[in-house]
Amino acid sequence: MAARAEGVEALATGPVGRLLWHGSVQATMSVGVYGVYALTNAWFVAHGVGPTAMGAVNLVAPVLLVLGALSTTVGAGGASLVSRRLGAGDTDGAARAAGNAFIVFWAGAVAISVTGLAAIEPLLTALGAHGEMRGFARDYAVIILASTLVGTGFSSLVRAEGRLRFATWLWVVPVLVQIVLDPLLIFGLGMGVRGAATGTVGGQAVSAAMSLWFFFARKDRPYRIRAAQLRPHGPTIRELLAVGSPSMTAGLGATLLALIVNNTLATAAAVTAYAVCARVQTFATMPHLGISMGMQPIAGLNTGRGRPDRVHRVRRLALAASLAYGALAATVVVLTAGPLTTALLGTPSPEAATALRLIAIGFCIAGVPPLTAAYFQAIGRPRPSYLVSIGTVLAVKVPAVLIGATAGPTGVWLGLLAGELLSAAIAFAVLRRRA
C-alpha cells in the first residue's frame, strides 16, 4: 500500500530536524492537553469538594501510575516493533505486534481491576489514605479500577506508523470530553470525587473507541489487525515485553516513589502541597515527554531501515531540545510558584509554594532520563533503559527522599530535587557511553 506523506516513507526520507520538530509538537500538544486536564481536574475538585478531597484524589495517583505503566509498556514495546517491522517492509509482522499489544494490555487491565477491587481496603491503607481522606480516596479508586479496560488509546502504535494527526486527536478529543464532564458531574450533579473519576473514565472510553476504529476499521493504512494477529504469539509477546518492560519498571518506580512520599508526609497540608506540585509537574514536564515521543518513531523506523546516521542525529537533536525547554520551564515555574499554588487551592499556601519552587528546579534536566530510556527502547536495546528507569529510582530517588524525610517536609522536597538531578546525570552518562 502506498505510504502517505505523513506516514512511513516520510519518517525514512524527510529531514530529521523537521520530522522531530513536527513529531514533538504534535506529541506535546497531545500530552499537553492531558496536562491541562490534570490542572483543571485539580481545580474542579479543590473548589467543588475541597482541598482535602484533592489531596485524597492524588493519593490514588499510584493506581493510575500502575495502569499507565502497563499502557506505556505495551505502547513502547509495540511501537518499537511496529516501527522496525515497517522499516524492514514486514507489514504482517507489524500487524502481529500491534494485535499482541492489544491482547497484553487487555489481560493486564483485567488483572489490575480484579486485584484492586478485591483488595480495596488494604490498598487504601498502603496508599496512605487515612481519616477524612479515606472516603474520598475510596470513591475515586473504585471507579478508576472498575474501568481499566479503557485505560489507553494506543496512541504510541498510531504514532509508530507516522500518523501524527490521529495520534494527537486520540489525546485531544478525550481530554475535551473530560473537561466538559468534570464541572457537569462535580458541580451540576453534585457527584464530588465520583464525578471527577467518572469524567476521567468517560474521556478514556472515547479514546479507546477511536483507537478501535483506527486499527480495525480504517483502510488507508500500511496494515490492518485481523483475527489471526490477535492470537497470542510467543516470540512477539516476549520481544514486546522485553523492549517495553523498562516503561513498566519506570511506572512502578514512580508508583513506589509516590507511595513513599505520601507516607512520609505527616500532615494533610503537606500531602495537599505535594498534590499541587504533582499536578503542576505533570503539566510542566509534558513537552519533555512530547520530545521523547516525537523521537521514537524516527529512531525506530530508521533502525529498521539500517540508517544509523539518521538515528544518531535525531537523538542529538532531541537531547538539545529537552535541555533547552527544561531551562525555560524551571525558570517560569520557580518565578510563579506562589500564584500557581494559590490559583489551584483557592487560598495562599506558603508550604505548597516552597515545595513547588524546590521541585521545579529539577525540571531543567527532568527530560534526560525518559529520553534516554525511550531512545534505547526505540532501537530495540532495552537493557540501558532498565538501568535508567528502575535503577535510578531504587538507587537514587527513593534513598534521597527517605534521607530527606528525616528533616520533615522541606527535606522531602529537597530529596525529590536531589534525586532528579542525580538521575539525570546517570542517564546522560549512559546515553553517551552506550549510544
Image (cartoon, rainbow, N blue to C red):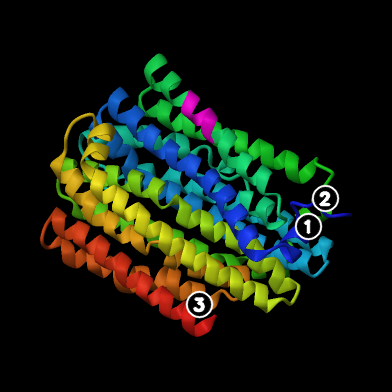
Within 10 Å of the Cα at label 2, are there few (<14), some (14-19), or many (20+) other Cα atoms? few
Q: Position of residue 173 (x, y in %)?
A: 59, 33
Question: Mark 2 = which residue?
Answer: 226
Looking at numbered disc 2 in the image, what kind of residue is underneath it?
Arg
**Secondary element at image label 3:** helix
Q: Position of residue 411 (x, y in %)?
A: 15, 60
Left or right: residue 336 versus residue 144 is left
Q: Nearer the viewer, residue 402 or 294?
A: 294
Looking at numbered disc 1 in the image, what kind of residue is underneath it?
Ala
Q: Position of residue 373 (x, y in %)?
A: 50, 69
Res. 347 mark: none
Residue at the spot x=41%, y=39% of the render? 38
Q: Nearer the viewer, residue 323 or 231?
A: 323
Question: Mark 1 = which residue?
Answer: 95
Looking at numbered disc 3 in the image, what kind of residue is underneath it?
Pro
Q: Earlier in the sequence, mark 1 or mark 2?
A: 1
Q: Mark 1 near mark 2, Cβ–Cβ under 8 Å?
A: yes
Residue range corresponding to the magenta coloring: 175-180
Residue at the spot x=60%, y=72% of the render? 313
Q: Earlier in the sequence, mark 1 or mark 3?
A: 1
Question: In front of the other: label 3 or label 2?
Answer: 3
- Where is the N terminus found, in terms of image quarters? bottom right
